[in-house]
Image (cartoon, rainbow, N blue to C red):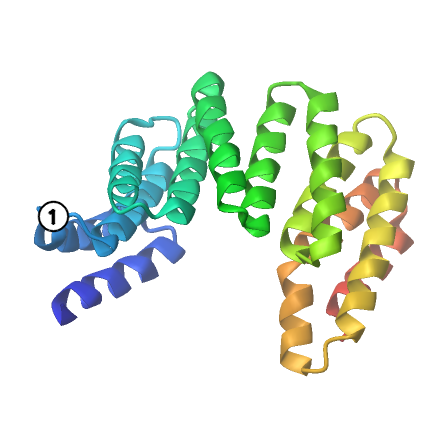
Amino acid sequence: MEEIEQYLNVGDNFLQKEKYIDALREYQKAYQRLSGKKSEELADLCYRISQAYNGLEPKNDENSRKFAEEALSIHSDLNLREMQVMDLLNLGYIEIDASKLSEAEKYLLRAAELARETRDGFLVATSLNALAELRDTQGRKNDALGIYEEVIKETEKAKDWENYFEALRGKIAIVREKNEEEALNMALKSLDLIDSIAQGIKSKRERKDFKSNLDFMYDLASDIAMELNDVDMAIKIAQRSKSE
């Protein structure tokens, strides 16, 4: 097992650096040793392999889908429903990258349905955010907005800020297409909320990590400000992102 762990660790390091061929080489070594017996470890490895193939060939879903489906099959046999949701989301994003939106829709609808069955609020919100992203890609803007607003409402209650701001980003992006000034106001209000939440976090490190994980909201607000030629506002936003 130590040898397998070494392959996985090296592969993960390559994957983080987007060195997909190198990652696959290490993962395949581990796969040869784990395959033959269905286990959580093998399913997790298949998930990683699918991610590496997707990074290497995002427009070709053959290999990434193959290993993602193997992970789903194993998790289904082991009755690990939460992990099945993650597998279905992975498959959905793989098909979105491959521009197979009808296939993506099937996976993401199954993910949302299964997530609801688990009664795990985080998984439900994550699945709905993915589905909203697909609806946006399909040009079904009103449907996407409706889903994002549902997620925003529920995650605010649960203080699931990861999914909350992910949904808010999606909503702002759609609003921006018609009204950039309104989108900027929404983005600035979101930064006020981030600052307010951060002030309630006692640990300096945790506070910094919280804001760092939401860098995309600052980037979005700054980008809109620049689009409106409000350079001063863009600079202020950049300064806010670095403040503690």
| Figure label count | 1
Q: Is 124 placed above or below 14 here? A: above
Q: Position of residue 29 (x, y in %)?
A: 13, 53
Question: Depth check: 191 or 223 in front?
Answer: 191
Lateral position of residue 148 relative to residue 237, left or right:
left
Q: Residue at x 21, y 51 (%)?
A: 42
Camera-side residue: 2 or 156? 156
Q: Position of residue 133 (x, y in %)?
A: 61, 32
**Residue in the picture at 60% in, 37% down:** 128
Indicate whether 105 appears above or below 44: above
The reply to whether residue 139 is visible in this rendering is: yes
The residue indicated by pointer 1 is 35
Horizontal side of 21 relative to 154 (left or right) equals: left
Question: Residue 4, how many percent across, how many down?
Answer: 16, 63
- In the rendered image, residue 209, in percent from the top left (x then y), is placed at 62, 70
Horizontally, residue 176 falls left or right of residue 107, namely: right
Residue occupying image coordinates x 75% and y 37%: 149
The type of residue carrying mark 1 is Ser
Locate the C terminus and report the quarter of the image it occupies: bottom right
Could you tell me which secondary element the residue under label 1 belongs to? loop
Task: Classify residue 84 by image quadrant.
Answer: top left
Q: Is residue 243 visible?
A: no
Relative height, residue 176 to residue 241 (above, below)? above
Residue 63, relative to residue 121: is it above or below? Answer: above
* Front residue of this view, candidates 16 and 32: 32
* Residues packed near mark 1 inside 10 Å, few (<14), some (14 to 19) or many (20 plus): some
Q: Quadrant of residue 33?
A: bottom left
Residue depicted at x 57% and y 43%: 124
Viewer-proximal residue among 4 and 226: 4
